[in-house]
Amino acid sequence: AQKVTQAQTEISVVEKEDVTLDCVYETRDTTYYLFWYKQPPSGELVFLIRRNSFDEQNEISGRYSWNFQKSTSSFNFTITASQVVDSAVYFCALSEAGSGNTGKLIFGQGTTLQVKP
Amino acid sequence: NAGVMQNPRHLVRRRGQEARLRCSPMKGHSHVYWYRQLPEEGLKFMVYLQKENIIDESGMPKERFSAEFPKEGPSILRIQQVVRGDSAAYFCASSITFGLNEQFFGPGTRLTVL
């Protein structure tokens, strides 16, 4: 069964602090994709990253970095030197790419990040 | 290159009315996914369509909900006889192919049932 768990419901930090959002997934497929999306207060979904199951290299994009560890089925997201504009709900998602799969995204419950000035 | 368009952005219906939500995928995309976000919850997959075909409707409620993606025109998610529990944000996403490619999300339609 496929599942994505974001155990942190809400996180509150003060500006300039680093913050890590956890994501743990379950899948039986050996080929899959993991995603992070940001949903700001305006409500739209903003794509942040896609990572395939064969690429365990960590990725950094500006203040954002992602740590993918297959051994623990985790795909954590870190924001360095957080800013007020980072306040949003962040979703981790899984898409299985094995035979018979249609690419639908399975989302976690989301983590609400509040960055205070 | 326009992104995924959804309309209306906000829709208010009274219980028992019908709601029609439209989604125009990005140019060149022939795969459409619909997701529902209930209040304070994550997004849940509803249905996946290609032009003129429903491929996966495993997330659709068994009654009152239907979806189509005709050869011409937008994809339509139709909810008949709406109830208060249908109040949610409905997002569609399009993809150039299924599975391996990024899904581009529309801005969503926020349905409120009075």
Image (cartoon, rainbow, N blue to C red):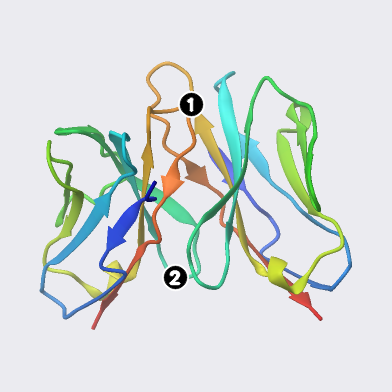
The location of residue B56, given as percent across then percent down, is 28, 34
On the picture, is A29 further left or further right than B89? right
The location of residue B99, given as percent across then percent down, is 44, 28
**B3 lies above or below B79:** above
Q: Quadrant of the C terminus of chain B?
A: bottom left
The location of residue B104, given as percent across then percent down, is 44, 45
**B107 lies above or below B112:** above
Kindly identify which chain the residue marked by label 2 belongs to: B
Residue B51 found in image quarter: top left
Q: Residue at x 81, y 81 (%)?
A: A117
Q: Amino acid at mark 2?
A: Pro
Q: Residue at x 56, y 56 (%)?
A: A109
Distance from the alpha carbon under mark 1 to that under mark 2: 29 Å
For the residues labelled 1 and 2, say whether their Cβ atoms are less than 8 Å apart. no
- Dot 1 falls on a residue whose secondary structure is loop
The residue wearing badge 1 is B100
On the picture, is A10 further left or further right than B40? right
Q: Amino acid at mark 1?
A: Leu
The residue wearing badge 2 is B39
On the picture, is A117 further left or further right than B106? right
